[in-house]
């Protein structure tokens, strides 16, 4: 197979040995994103092939939100400084680094405006206005937008950028139980997004007390494990209790005409999901994306010599038409100026899940050779019923991706009972280490200091009634255990990991 | 029919006599938008019922864009000041009032960042990077985003706001003809959006030389006429020639390996489309929206007394199920605590295009009474084949809305041959006045000064090959005419109107 133009077009770094450089190369060479202008460190330009991934993720999740009572809305891009101050007063520890707008046109503003780092403080006063009676509850709002946090030092596209795309959901409920059920509904939808759409196993748990969203009663999290052994906080869903309700006067009158405070939640997932996706599945040939997200699910590469050209192209065209008819996203690469080897490399780099090769032999036999992107697995398929066969192959690609990631995850949850064991296990293997823990932040500190690992999750207190997708962070130890880091009794199981 | 709660819930202002106040009331009472916080004049909050209109508009237009080769992308929210300066250097007259970010966190930035007022100057350098050869052309990018212009003094939701939602398309082409065809393709799609989705006739034309987008060779426009006789620039599509290509080094190598400059376009429509929609169709009972955009296309109101309740509700439920099955958006208003009259008022206020009333008589007869929102037209429909009958009724509602607006438009294009006639006709009737014009801005000035009317369109030089939707601004006068405002020969026909 020819590899003309291979080196400079293809990925040159090794995923295993130069993970960071490899990631940056995949993102750029698969044309997902470019870096922002020189003067704008921390910003990226999302190119069509990257944005298409986001659009499909958005479309799936947005559909589920709407089926479960969520309405989209749009709130202003800016938040007055006094609103953020109000949030700071009620929510200890809230002090975001933001981009400040100080001038409109030539004029200096009376009050600075923050480019929204998140929208709690501008959405809450409106929910307070709109909710009057118990009949208005639950109220569930969501917006798809970009937010800015002036934090990123180095830029890692999708993982670490000053501006990022996300959705933020904000809901109000009559009861604590209602808000908690909402929190778990969204957590389950995020886990489902990872499992069914991104082909990534998701670990569901809660953040420890000291790492909750400021003001939250419980912060729940979906964690995913990257191949380098680090954990990514892949989505979060917060049960805010009545803290925002009290601070922003979000009240309702109940059936007895008594005034009560609402229980609220917020939840979000950002384009970091795309970063985790790229990091998990891609390889030294380039991008790998699961069929549900791929801009092209199938690429057909016709292979001809001389006089076969027209017959092969006609045949390939018919297959493409059949697949499109069946609703599949198909690219027929009939470029004359490129040879098949070049095309194979290019579409592998771009992550198309399935390649169909058709040459004179296939025309003769009424078949096509299907090649799976993740593992190179290849087999003949019949052109009669080609759409069904391709769907099967795409399902297999999804499973292959999921299974590989699930295997990595299950191999990388280990137990440890002492400080030395935690340090050694995380240090040597990465991944998660489950350990009995007293609940004190002070016991996390030395681990953080020595090997930059932290507690990424603890078990969720209350299981969902019908337990959702994703594996649950579970208690690995008895209640009688003592904390692995001090002599106090263990209160829960802590999952330590290094993080992104 | 009872009208309990009518006055304070319903619209109190008259569309004819207090248009501005009426508009503000409709927007708020139909729950489309709220005003931003006190400290943020010019900003609005788009509530779920308003955002749902935008989402449907977006979904329709985005589908057409994709069918015609456009890829979505996402560029940074900020534009460095030096980039805007670069645009100012090349594009005379470009001097937008912008919101300036001067600080990131605690730190003052080396260079101020503008919150994007439009993205030409940040997108063009990337297109320059990505376009190498003629094979990369045409390149068509679009983004859906918000932009900020620090201009609005008074806030009029959707019409006049400092931040607004829009899409901006940016394309590069090998030839001038390619760019011009692109310009017209998008103009046609905008006209189609107004006609087929918003049920509004659209007038297609070009802006006069002195009112083009800075740097454009031709600015084309879709104009729509509001009931108060003012014209709204409802969407624009710019043929930018090579001015941006030259300024930003957007070049390509042609088939002979010669380097050439690209011809570019840009085009956009904003949520002002929603403003025009509300203004055009709504009435003193509240919002009216065409079926293609309506969050609920049909509301079913069951009417019962005492023992009929269950039978009527069951019957209504079956109709709702049939309609949903057929893909229609249906609300079954089965609230016990509200009487039918209250419900009628509420859903009229919210603009649901079609109401189905079902009571014991309808149950008996196997029918439902359909009432059209725009004109109160009512008729019985059979529950056998109810979905088809409802679809027909919705088509009729669309036509009713379109026809009314088209009639207003056709009655309000008048001709004038002298300054006095222009002043008198626009002054008395509003609408458009077509007049022979020499092409000089100086001749527009006195009209602008005296009655605040300006030239909103002139005929497009070259007709599209297959002329698209929308009526074309046409030449109403011979070439032998002289300008209505001076004695020079007329070069074209000018359409004067007052504007939003």
Image (spheres, coloured by chain):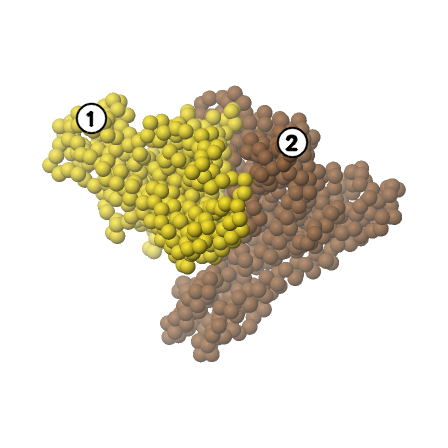
Chain colours: A yellow, B brown
B257 or B175: nearer the viewer: B257
Q: Quadrant of residue A1?
A: top left
From the viewer's side, name the closer residue of A170 and A323: A323
Asked if residue A167 shows in the view, the reply is no
Residue A411 point in image, percent of width and height? 23, 37
Residue B191 vs B83, above or below: the answer is below
Q: Is residue A342 left or right of residue B433?
A: left
Residue at the (52%, 73%) spot, across then down: B381
Callout 1: chain = A
CA separation, marks 2 and 1? Answer: 62 Å
Disc 2: CA contacts within 10 A as few (<14), some (14-19) or many (>=20): few
Q: Position of residue B57 (x, y in %)?
A: 54, 51
Image quarter of residue B359: bottom left
Quadrant of the drawing holding the C terminus of chain B = top right
Name the residue at the left extreme: A480
Q: Secondary structure at mark 1?
A: helix
Secondary structure state at the residue bearing disc 2: loop
- Mark 2 or 1: in front is 2
In this rendering, the answer to whether B337 lies above or below A182 is: below
- The reply to whether dot 2 and dot 1 touch (C-beta < 8 Å) is no
**Would residue A370 appear left or right of B94 to someone viewing this image?**
left
- Which residue is rendered at x = 53% and y = 74% of the image? B380
Q: Position of residue A341 (x, y in %)?
A: 45, 39
Q: Which residue is mark 2?
A: B258
Which chain is mark 2 on?
B
- Residue sitting at x 83%, y 42%: B438
Camera sees residue B247: yes
User: Residue visible at 15% across and 28% down?
Assistant: A418
Residue marked by disc 1: A424
Where is residue B55? Give x, y as percent: 51, 50
């Amino acid at each position: 197979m020819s590899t003309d133009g291979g080196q400079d077009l293809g990925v040159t770094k090794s995923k295993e040995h130069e993970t960071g450089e490899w990631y940056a190369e995949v993102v750029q060479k698969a044309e997902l994103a470019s870096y922002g202008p020189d003067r704008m460190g921390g910003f990226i330009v999302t190119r069509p092939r990257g944005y298409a991934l986001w659009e499909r993720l958005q479309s799936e999740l947005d559909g589920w939100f709407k089926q479960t009572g969520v309405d989209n809305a749009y709130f202003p891009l800016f938040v007055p400084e006094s609103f953020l101050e109000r949030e700071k007063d009620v929510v200890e520890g809230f002090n975001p680094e933001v981009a400040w707008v100080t001038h409109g046109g030539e004029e200096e503003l009376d009050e600075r405006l923050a480019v929204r780092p998140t929208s709690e403080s501008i959405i809450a006063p409106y929910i307070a206005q709109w909710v009057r009676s118990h009949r208005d509850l639950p109220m569930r709002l969501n917006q798809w937008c970009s937010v800015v946090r002036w934090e990123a030092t180095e830029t890692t596209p999708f993982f670490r950028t000053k501006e990022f795309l996300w959705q933020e959901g904000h809901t109000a409920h009559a009861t604590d139980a209602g808000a908690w059920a909402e929190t778990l509904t969204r957590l389950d939808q995020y886990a489902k997004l990872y499992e069914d759409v991104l082909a990534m196993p998701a670990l569901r748990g809660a953040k420890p007390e000291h790492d909750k969203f400021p003001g939250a009663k419980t912060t729940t999290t979906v964690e995913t494990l990257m191949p380098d052994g680090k954990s990514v906080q892949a989505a979060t869903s917060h049960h805010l209790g009545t803290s925002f309700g009290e601070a922003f006067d979000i009240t309702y009158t109940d059936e007895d005409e008594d005034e009560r405070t609402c229980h609220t939640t917020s939840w979000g997932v950002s384009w970091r999901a795309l970063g985790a996706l790229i990091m998990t599945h891609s390889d030294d040939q380039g991008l790998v994306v699961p069929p549900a997200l791929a801009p092209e699910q199938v690429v057909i590469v016709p292979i001809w010599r001389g006089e076969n050209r027209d017959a092969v192209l006609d045949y390939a065209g018919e297959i493409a038409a059949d697949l499109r008819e069946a609703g599949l996203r198909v690219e027929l690469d009939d470029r004359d100026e490129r040879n098949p080897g070049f095309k194979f490399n290019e579409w592998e780099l771009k992550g198309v899940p399935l390649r169909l090769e058709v040459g004179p032999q296939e025309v003769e036999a009424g078949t096509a050779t299907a090649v799976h992107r993740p593992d190179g697995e290849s087999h003949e398929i019949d052109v009669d019923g080609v759409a069904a066969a391709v769907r099967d192959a795409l399902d297999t690609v999804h499973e292959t991706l999921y299974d590989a990631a699930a295997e990595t995850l299950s191999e990388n949850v280990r137990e440890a009972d002492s400080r030395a064991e935690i340090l050694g296990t995380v240090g040597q293997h990465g991944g998660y280490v489950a350990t009995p823990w007293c609940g004190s932040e002070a016991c996390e500190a030395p681990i953080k200091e020595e090997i930059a690992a932290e507690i990424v999750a603890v078990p969720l207190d209350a299981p969902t009634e019908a337990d959702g997708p994703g594996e649950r962070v579970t208690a690995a130890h008895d209640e009688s255990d003592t904390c692995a880091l001090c002599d106090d009794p263990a209160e829960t199981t802590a999952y330590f990991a290094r993080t992104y």
